[in-house]
Amino acid sequence: MLIHQIPNSPPYLRVKMWRRLQKIGAVAVKNAVYVLPLSDQASEDFHWVAREIMEAGGDASVCEATFIEGLKTNELIELFRAARESDYAELSTEIKDLGQELRTAQAGDEAWASVMAGGVARIRQRLTEIQNIDFFPGAARKQAEVQVSELETKIRRAPIRRAQQQPGSYSGRTWVTRTGVHVDRMASAWLIRRFIDPAARFRFVAAKGYRPEASDLRFDMFDAEFTHEGELCTFEVLLERLNIGDRALRPIAELIHDIDLKDPKFGRPETAGIALVVNAICTKHKDDMDRIERATVLFDELYDFFKRR
């Protein structure tokens, strides 16, 4: 239980604390009295809120409590469920709105696909946030999970027209990406040199303030010709957009996807080891071109290994 008294100044503090308490899933049983089910995480969450209130000149106490008279345990549980049902209802409205866009929009181009995938990712993230504070799950949770899964399936199955380009249309170009290259940019640079543009030159620029030249080809950066699309990392986009069908590249793409997006989608057994090697390269080598040269050895040998298999 959190019992607090918030000072009148600054005026925004009361709203800020209210939002903080909403985010951790606390419910109010009295004015300025909030409760959470007893757990280490709840205790830690309340202690952080209490500290912030006291540092702002207010007063707060955190305690463990059992209600003996008045409010009953089952009534408390219903307060938590009602709060989460409201959250799920809002999420359901967002899901229906996005589903309507999916039904009425002119599906097909890549920009549409990117926007729709981004919307689904946002909804999935919101569902996860609600689930994390849903201490007494009910039917609303299951319904929301089904709705989000159905929407994700519709997005995956939606037809997308992608401009198919051939690697031969690129030769001796300048390929530009952000400084501080890591796994996706390192692997994409290797793919570009080995399968797309053997005479490629690389240039590394700051994310802000860069103005592309007419001859530049950008990858894995904002507004680039080749960058993340929906659930695809840049390496996967290069394979798909340039129609590179070498089967030995598929397991490498799966490794890059899971490491770059921190997503265990493919769950290959080599993922953790490759991630460690990439991190070791980045730790030792601060120069971007040095990182790419070192990664080239790694991906050459990975490719040869999968090719033989």
Image (tube, helix red, strand yellow):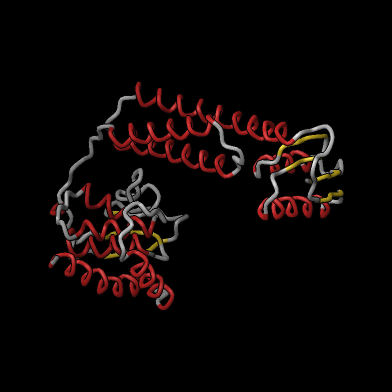
Residue shown at 22% from the left, 47% from the top: 241
Q: Residue 5 vs residue 131: left or right?
A: right
In front of the other: 121 or 107: 121
Q: Residue 107 vs residue 163: left or right?
A: right
**Quadrant where the image shows the C terminus:** bottom left
Residue 35 lies in quadrant: top right
Q: Is residue 141 above or below residue 54?
A: above
Residue shown at 35% from the left, 70% from the top: 273
Q: Is residue 283 above or below residue 265?
A: below
Q: Residue 68 vs residue 295: left or right?
A: right
The reply to whether residue 216 is in sight is no
Residue 190's x, y, as percent?
Answer: 25, 65
Residue 278's x, y, as percent?
Answer: 36, 70
Residue 284's x, y, as percent?
Answer: 41, 78
In front of the other: 15 or 271: 271
The reply to whether residue 252 is in sight is yes
Residue 60's x, y, as percent?
Answer: 84, 49
Residue 31 lies in quadrant: top right
- Residue most toward the bottom? 284
Q: Is residue 121 above or below residue 43?
A: above
In front of the other: 186 or 142: 142
Residue shown at 84% from the left, 35% from the top: 69
